[in-house]
Amino acid sequence: GAVVSQHPSRVICKSGTSVKIECRSLDFQATTMFWYRQFPKKSLMLMATSNEGSKATYEQGVEKDKFLINHASLTLSTLTVTSAHPEDSSFYICSARDRAGGREKLFFGSGTQLSVL
Amino acid sequence: AQSVTQPDIHITVSEGASLELRCNYSYGATPYLFWYVQSPGQGLQLLLKYFSGDTLVQGIKGFEAEFKRSQSSFNLRKPSVHWSDAAEYFCAVGAGAFGNEKLTFGTGTRLTIIP
């Protein structure tokens, strides 16, 4: 079964509103989660690295005030798209890193399709 | 900067036939290379990964991939595909101790299986 739960899977919102996407690790603690964005027929692009208890690290060109990331617990990271506009419409995917036992695995959520009208 | 190219957007293969999905990468050092598969409504699942050592890597579901440094390639293969293999396949290159930092993905190859 899924070890990373991402919600919602699909959201439609009006331009100017804010949308929150949740990423939860279900059976492990994730000090680090990653947020990606995918445009149609394009690669998944890393947006930011979310670290529990500290500020997220954003990739070049990603507006941190636009895409607010909160990683307040070891099992939950949220991405809030603020004042969404049609150009923010995209597929957003999170991943969570499991470092238990000295090994490292990465688990992905099933993604969120955001459509801004 | 690292980059990944998957030249085939869509491939159609008959069930039982062999499969090869192409992946070329650009990376400054020895790369960490991955193949992921995504079925509709599912998250990306790791098929296999290459860090070092044997250049022929075995993965889950009968997949294998071969790292060829001279060609900057990491092609995915399967000798006989099953209808359940229909999905989107992503090649990726990463950094960090386990290669999971700053993953860069290709644009994906959609695999269709016909009877």
Image: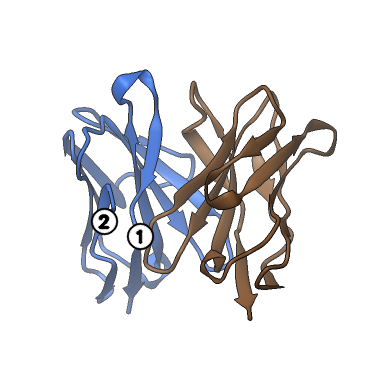
Task: Report x, y in % for residue B102.
Answer: 49, 35
- Labels 1, 2: one chain: yes
Quarter of the image for the C terminus of chain A: give it.
bottom left
Task: Answer above or below: position of B26 versus A9.
Answer: above
Q: Residue at x 38, y 61 (%)?
A: B42
Task: Answer above or below: position of B29 versus A96.
Answer: above
Q: Residue at x 65, y 36 (%)?
A: B57
Viewed as shown, does residue A86 lie left or right of A15? right
- Secondary structure at badge 2 equals strand
Residue type at tag 2: Gln
Q: Which mark is residue A111?
A: 1
- Determine the residue located farthest toward the left in the rendered image: A73
Q: Residue at x 72, y 67 (%)?
A: B17
> Which hue is chain B drawn in?
brown
The answer to whether residue A54 is visible is yes
- Secondary structure at badge 1 equals loop
> Which hue is chain A drawn in?
blue
Task: State the colouring used for the structure image.
Answer: by chain
The quadrant holding residue A104 is: top left
Mark nearer the N terminus (1 vs 2):
2
Callout 1–callout 2 Cβ contact below 8 Å: yes
Task: Report x, y in % for residue A103.
Answer: 39, 23
Viewed as shown, does residue A100 lie left or right of B60? left
The quadrant holding residue B9 is: bottom right
- Determine the residue located farthest toward the top in the rendered image: A102
Task: Report x, y in % for residue A110.
Answer: 35, 59
In the picture of the structure, the residue carrying the numbered disc 2 is A6
Residue type at tag 1: Gly
Dot 1 falls on which chain? Answer: A
